[in-house]
Amino acid sequence: MVNPTQLPGWLVRQYPFKPASFITSLGARMSYVDDGPRKDEAVLLLHGNPTWSFYYRELIRELSAAGLRCIAPDHIGMGLSEQPEDYPYTLETRIADIEALVASLGLKRVHLVVHDWGGAIGFGFAGRHPQMIGRLVILNTAAFAANHIPFRIAVCGWPLIGPLLVRGLNGFARPATRMAMQRRSLSEDEKRGYLFPYDSWAHRVAVSAFVRDIPMNSSHPSWDTLAAVEQRLGQFRNHPALIVWGGLDFCFDDQFLARWQGMLANLQCERISDAGHYVLEDAGPQVVPMIKAHLLKA
């Protein structure tokens, strides 16, 4: 298990935070960044698979320097959080974990920034606490069921072969450091940062579980949870929302973008045509100021 207080120097130079810890109701240690002035209003930044709060490092620096409190958790099994083999790695559990973290911090107002599976988790939390939710930032994600999945992702969720690929060969997190980028390539230290928590079979348990938790039909255990998330999205139709979308994402493609555009009325949409799934990494200097400006509006 990664010790968040003993990070190597090369990682600290990129990720200069002192993560805090929270124990979930199921007894697992969640690592999270809490940066910026201590207020009861915060920006909640939720990552997906196979990233961790490292994905938001530059955005956190910019927002906290501007006076915004930033909360960026690592979901259980991901990043610097505990990686238990037998945790219930389901959408329902992940939403509950975020609910408990937010309650423990005494937050009264939350602005959401979500990416990848962070969309379903974040809007799952939001749908249960709509009175708390302020501004929205949506980055190549979904919070609704889809009828297609890229084959390269689907195979990672298959019985037997999936765990061999994802946990044995690191065949999800490692390829993502290339496939999720289009405009530029990650530096070697950036790649090391993304892969740092996922250095063994045991430490890739949640990467594999995240893929298996993608519900594609009503028989899947997380189908009802995702359906409930989708049903509650209408509560946010008129919330001020910014979509920053990598146009060359092989997974969350423009079909997902079109669905968001149909759901949200008070929307600013910025499609970055030559950026990939890791849009914050691919086009950071272009998109971080957009996000900062959106979140600083009164």
Image: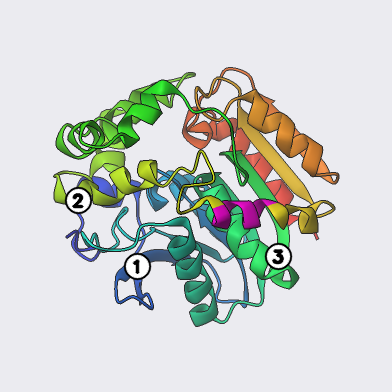
Compared to residue 298, the image places residue 280 above or below, namely: above
- In the rendered structure, find residue 203 and report the number of the disc placed on it: 2
Check disc 2: other Cα within 10 Å, few if <14, some if 14-19, many if 20+: many
- In the rendered structure, find residue 133 and report the number of the disc placed on it: 3
Residues at circles 3 and 2 in contact by the CB criterion of under 8 Å? no
- In the rendered structure, find residue 62 and report the number of the disc placed on it: none
164 left or right of 297 in image:
left
274 left or right of 232 in image:
left
In front of the other: 199 or 209: 209
In front of the other: 98 or 17: 98
Q: CA distance from mark 3 to mark 1?
A: 22 Å
Residues at circles 3 and 1 in contact by the CB criterion of under 8 Å? no
- In the rendered structure, find residue 30 and report the number of the disc placed on it: 1
Segment tinted magenta in the rendering: 224-230
Q: CA distance from mark 1 to mark 2?
A: 14 Å
Which residue lies at the image location 30% right of the left edge and 34% below the top edge? 158
